[in-house]
Image: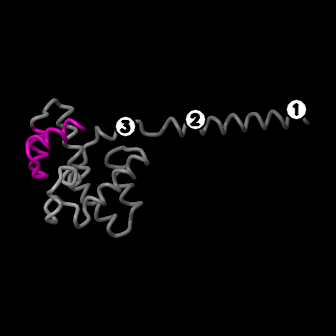
Amino acid sequence: MDILFWVVVLVAAALIALVIVSRSAARSTLDPTSVSIDPALATEVRKLYASNEKVQAIKALRAATGLGLADAVRIADKMAGAGKPGATAGSSPGARTGSAARADSISPGDELEIRDLIAEGRKIDAIRTVRRLTGMDLQEATSYVESL
């Protein structure tokens, strides 16, 4: 009877280990910098966040992009912050004084678009996009793009 007990315990431990390993293997290995976020999805995520439905916002982002939980939470938080008043480059007179302040005005969705352009070898288009979004001069925009 004693041996039978230990056999059952070992089998149970093996099954538990198998479940843990399979769950960790099922986690997303998607690179969050390679994900393009549709503007409609970004708007939906911001609206859900604004209405205090953060879990739904993260679920929507994960369903549409295949991101892992940690990456989806981080991106959703940034998206929600980008939609707040005062987050745009021209929102206050002092906001345009530094390129860092203007770089903050780039939403996560726009940043992903810029990263996609860089990955495609379209650095000039990426710089143009940064200048259009932020009002940076050529040198500031080039520096920003090269820092990504």
Q: Secondary structure at mark 1?
A: helix
Q: Nearer the viewer, mark 1 or mark 3?
A: 3
Find residue 128 and report its image quarter: top left
Query: Sequence order check: which comes first, mark 3 or mark 2?
Result: 2
Magenta part of the chain:
125-148
Tell me whether the residue at label 1 lies in contact with that at label 3, contact meaning CB atoms closer than 8 angstroms: no
Q: Position of residue 17 (x, y in %)?
A: 65, 36
According to the picture, the residue beneath numbered tag 3 turns out to be 30
Q: Quadrant of the C terminus?
A: top left
Q: Position of residue 131 (x, y in %)?
A: 10, 47
**Which one is in front, 56 or 52?**
52
Q: Amino acid at mark 2?
A: Val
> Which residue occupies the extreme top position in the image?
121
What crowding class fits label 1: few (fewer than 14 Cα within 10 Å), some (14-19), or many (20 or more)? Answer: few
Determine if the magenta segment contains residue 147. yes
Find residue 78 and report its image quarter: bottom left
Q: Secondary structure at mark 2?
A: helix
According to the picture, the residue beneath numbered tag 1 turns out to be 3
Query: Sequence order check: which comes first, mark 1 or mark 3?
Result: 1
Q: Does 24 sit left or right of 85 as displayed?
A: right
Q: Label 1, label 2: how many angstroms apart (C-alpha)?
A: 27 Å
Q: Quadrant of the N terminus?
A: top right
Tell me whether the residue at label 3 lies in contact with that at label 2, contact meaning CB atoms closer than 8 angstroms: no
What residue is rendered at 90% in x and 35% in y?
Answer: 2
According to the picture, the residue beneath numbered tag 2 turns out to be 21
Q: Does 67 sit left or right of 129 as displayed?
A: right
Q: Label 3, label 2: how many angstroms apart (C-alpha)?
A: 19 Å
Q: Amino acid at mark 3?
A: Leu
Q: Is residue 88 above or below residue 69?
A: below
Q: Amino acid at mark 1?
A: Ile
Q: Does 131 sit left or right of 68 as displayed?
A: left
